[in-house]
Structure formats: structure tokens, C-alpha cells
Amino acid sequence: MASLKAIENRHEPIDLVDFEPDEGLVAVAVFDDYIKAGEAGLAILAMGNAYWMILHEERYVMCVVEARVASVCAELDALAALESRRGRRGGRFEYEEFDFGWLSFGLYAAVLIICFVWQGRSDIVTSGQTDVVVMVDGAQWWRAVTALTLHADVVHLVSNLISGLGFAFFVCRFFGAGAGWLLVLLSGIAGNVLNAVVYYPEPHYSIGASTAVFGALGVLTGVGVWAAISAPDRRLSLPRWLIPFFGGLTLLGLFGVGDGNVDVAAHISGFLCGVVLGGLGACVQRWFVLLQRWSMFVGGGALLLIGLAWWTAVAS
């Protein structure tokens, strides 16, 4: 069989003499673990290719069409090399750093600036701000999204532009541009929802991207906590996860808590939600390596979510 050599490179040699895939299919890999076979399947799907997983003698044989054998084998070899490096390093926390352009950062600035100009010419603040009572009683949860794009004044806008771009840069280095911005947005949305639950049934109103900004800080803190927990060489007398956690809390205290018209609860809510999302994302960071091929679509999903929220707000 033409694919037998490729199979042996990824697994110990096995007898496939009696294995006959359907016409037009070629076996490219074999696994005795269903989870690893599924991960290989995700890598193949991420390339835009179909695959067939066939159970043969209690092992899982991955097959693709003959025309895609070379490219799929190259991708699986790269995935196997990555897993091998992780294995040699004894389970130490490892991660990929993503390269990305500045398009997503320009879109972030454009969305906030456009909405700021729009709110100056139209009464959209009332329709888009977080209003705890109507969010809970009226199920207007889309306000958790729209409120992130509104700002009280130019100083408020510029502050969130600068800090948001700074924190998001490091989030995108770890998760990729599309997925990184989506995580920042989800942190802000979850933060606004949590803030509404905390204040309810008392009336409370707020606007601003700062909930998402501190959500981005929380994502970075969550990544740091996971990195410290998963590292095998703990030589400090105190838990290593306390270092990034208190580092994140320090930044939260410096920039997120203060006098004046500051929604401290929203900042804390965004930060805590970001910690959870960042920690969970760090656990499965290799999934984001596969998502990188679809980064523009993932980032487009974040923009679509904002657009749908505002469409609902205006239509209501």
C-alpha cells in the first residue's frame, strides 16, 4: 500500500495487509487512541479537507482522498513534531506565539470611534447602555454588547482605545488576532452580564469598553495562572500561580479602581470573567493553532456579534 510508510512514521508499524479502504481513499495515519485520532481529524478539517476514520483491528485508520495525501501528511507530520517537542519537555507549559497584522487593531479603533460619532448625532446611548433592570426583567441582554461601544466623552474613549490596544496585543500574541479579540469581547460581555446580576434589582447604568479592557487583562492573568500551575519545576515556597494573579490584581487596582464616574464593579466583573476565559483558553491553546487558519472568520464573528446587537437595539 502506498500509504504504509506514512503510517509507520506516525506510529509503530502494524499489519495492514488485509486493510482495503474504499476506492479513491488512501490511509495516511493510524492511532490506537480515539482522542488522538480526533485531534488529527481536527487538523485535517482545519485545512479544509474531508477525512474518513475507519476502525480496523481496534485501531483508528485515517483516510483521505488520494489527491490530498501529500498536504495532509505534511500537516500531520508537523502536528506530530509539535507533540514530540512537548513530550520531551516533560509537560512544561509551552505555547505558540502568533504573528498578525494590525488590521484587527484598526477595526477596534474604527468601531469605537464610529459609535462615538454616532452617539453624538443620535440618541443611541439610552438604547445601548447597560440598564440592569431592563436587562434582567426585559431580557435585553444585547445591551451587554452595545454598551461596550459607547463612551461618556473623548477622554473616556481615548483611554479605552490606548489601554485596549495594549492589553489586546498580548492576548492576540497568545491566541491569534481573530480568537484573541473574540475572547476580549466575550470577557466584556460576560463582565457586563455578571455586573447586571450583582446590581439587580437596584437600578444601574453604565457604558464603555473598559469592561472588555479589563477582561483582556483578566485573560492574560488567567494564562499566567495556568502557566504557573502547569509548570513542573515549582521551586517557590508559595504557589506560583499567585505571582501572575496578584500582578493582574495590581494592574486592576492601578487602572480599574478610582474616584469619579468609574464603574468599579464592571471592571472587576470583566477582569474575573477574563481570568476564567484566559485559563480555559490556555488549557487548550493548541486548538487556537488550528483556528489560526480561520482567524479572519473568527474575528468577523466578533464584528457580526456587535452588529447584531446594535441591530436588535435599534429595532427594539
Image: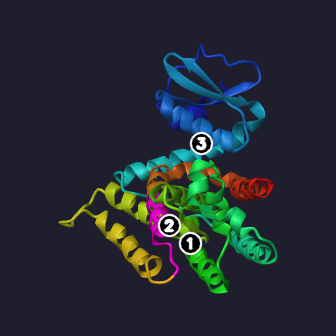
Categorize mark 1 by other alpha carbons within 10 Å: few (<14), some (14-19), many (20+): many
Quadrant assignment, res 179: bottom right
Given the current orientation, which residue lies at the most extreme top position? Answer: 18
Can residue 46 be seen in the rendering of this structure? yes
CB-based contact (under 8 Å), mark 1 and mark 2: yes
Establish if 161 lies above or below 183.
Answer: below
Residue 270 in magenta stretch: yes
Residue 76 image point, x, y percent: 59, 42
Q: In this image, 97 relative to 264: left or right?
A: right
Mark 1 / mark 2, whichever is N-terminal: 1
Point 49% across, 55% down: residue: 201
- Amino acid, disc 3: Leu
Quarter that holds the N terminus: top right
Categorize mark 3 by other alpha carbons within 10 Å: few (<14), some (14-19), many (20+): many
Residue 33 image point, x, y percent: 46, 29
- Amino acid, disc 2: Ala
Instruction: Find disc 2 in the rendering and name its residue.
Output: 266
Residues drawn in magenta = 261-275
Instruction: Find disc 3 in the rendering and name its residue.
Output: 76
Mark 1 / mark 3, whichever is N-terminal: 3
Name the residue nearer the viewer: 55 or 130.
Answer: 130
Residue 290 image point, x, y percent: 61, 49
Point 50% across, 35% down: residue: 36
- Amino acid, disc 1: Ser
- CA–CA distance between discs 1 and 2? 8 Å
Point 40% across, 71% down: residue: 248
Closest to the camera, between mark 2 and mark 3, is 2
Name the residue nearer the viewer: 44 or 157.
Answer: 157
Mark 2 / mark 3, whichever is N-terminal: 3
Which numbered dot is residue 210?
1
Closest to the camera, between mark 1 and mark 2, is 2
